[in-house]
Amino acid sequence: MNSAKLYVGNLSYDTTEATVRAAFEAHGEVTSVNLITDRDTGRPKGFGFVEMGSADEAQKAKSALDGTEMDGRTVKVDVAKEQTPRTNRSSGGYGGGYGGGRGGYRGGNRW
């Protein structure tokens, strides 16, 4: 494991960044805690990311905390995967209609 960033899942909606930070600091330096919230409602989504000071500290924290209880929930701790770039879906993606812009369905009456 060479990443110092960990995924933390199955968190209670009541869990705070301070709670997560305290749990992980017992296993090394915590450089950041980011709990993910819903963009529209601002409510927690039940997962987040913790960045540790080194890959070794991240491995220790993962081993110690995966499967343990935090705020009444059994948390899942794993190495965070690299985020893949998202495609922009707002335009429909295919030249204004279905069929790749080369004929196909465009949504209007053609007759």
Image (cartoon, grey):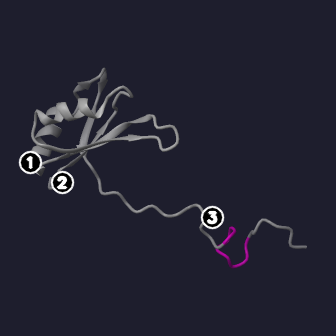
In the image, which disc is placed on residue 92? 3
User: Going from the N terminus, do you reach mark 1 or mark 3 first?
Assistant: 1
Q: Residues within 10 Å of mark 2 (few under 14, many from 20)?
A: some
Amino acid type, residue under disc 3 in the picture: Gly
Estimate the spatial distance between the alpha carbons at disc 2 and disc 3, rounded to whole Å.
Answer: 36 Å
Residue 60, image x, y percentages:
10, 40
Amino acid type, residue under disc 2 in the picture: Ser
Are circles 1 and 3 on residues that touch, CB within 8 Å? no
Up/down of 7 relative to 83, above or below: above
Q: Which residue is mark 2?
A: 3
Q: Per the image, is 103 magenta? A: yes
Residue 87, image x, y percentages:
49, 64
Q: Residues within 10 Å of mark 3 (few under 14, many from 20)?
A: few
Q: Which residue is mark 1?
A: 56
In the image, which disc is placed on residue 104? none
User: Where does the magenta region start and end?
Assistant: 96-104
Q: Per the image, is 51 magenta? A: no
Under tag 3, what secondary structure? Answer: loop
Q: Residue reaching furthest bottom?
A: 102
Closer-to-camera residue (63/52) = 52
Q: Residues within 10 Å of mark 1 (few under 14, many from 20)?
A: some
Q: Quadrant of residue 22?
A: top left
| Residue beneath the point at 35% across and 38% down | 47
Residue 10, image x, y percentages:
34, 32
User: Going from the N terminus, do you reach mark 1 or mark 2 first?
Assistant: 2
Residue 105, image x, y percentages:
75, 68
| Residue beneath the point at 33% across and 31% down | 11
